[in-house]
Image (cartoon, rainbow, N blue to C red):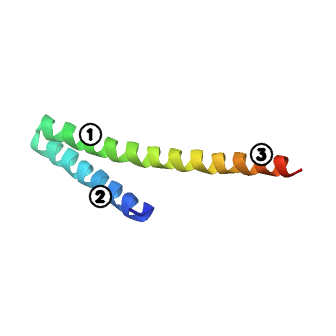
Amino acid sequence: MSDIKKDARDLKDKTKGEANETAGKVRGDKEQEMKGKGQSFGAEVKKDARELGDDIKREARKLKDKFDKKKDE
């Protein structure tokens, strides 16, 4: 799945969570409110984890390139 699709899915989950949280607040339903908070938080965690993974891959490539360059010298 492409990053755009994953980002869209996370945004959908976050929006769905925010809607559940708001609906829970309006209705006085703490369970629905907490479910919404959990959905929003989960979407944010997935997005942050994906970004961290991308950062790690990028830095690993830089390090590999640096070592390959030293090896060739």
Disc 1 is placed on an element classified as helix
Where's residue 2, x and y in %? 42, 64
Mark sitting earlier along the chain (3/2):
2
Circle 1 crowding by C-alpha within 10 Å: few under 14, some 14–19, many from 20: some
Which quadrant would the N terminus be assigned to in this image? Answer: bottom left
> What residue appears at the point 34 percent right and 47 percent down from the top-left corner?
43
> What residue appears at the point 81 percent right and 51 percent down from the top-left corner?
69
- The kind of residue on which mark 1 rests is Gly
Disc 2 is placed on an element classified as helix
Circles 1, 2 touching at the beta carbon (< 8 Å): no
> What residue appears at the point 77 percent right and 50 percent down from the top-left corner?
68
- Which is nearer the eye, 12 or 62? 62
Distance of label 3 from label 2 (alpha carbons):
41 Å
> How many marks on residues?
3
Where's residue 72, x and y in %? 85, 52
Disc 3 is placed on an element classified as helix
Q: From the image, tell me which residue sits under label 1.
A: 38
Distance of label 1 from label 2 (alpha carbons):
14 Å
Q: Comparing marks 3 and 1, which lies closer to the viewer?
A: 3
- The kind of residue on which mark 3 rests is Phe
Q: From the image, tell me which residue sits under label 2.
A: 12
Mark sitting earlier along the chain (3/1):
1
Circles 3, 2 touching at the beta carbon (< 8 Å): no
Question: What number is the disc on residue 67?
Answer: 3
Circle 3 crowding by C-alpha within 10 Å: few under 14, some 14–19, many from 20: few
- The kind of residue on which mark 2 rests is Lys
Q: Comparing marks 3 and 2, which lies closer to the viewer?
A: 3
- Which is nearer the eye, 14 or 30? 14
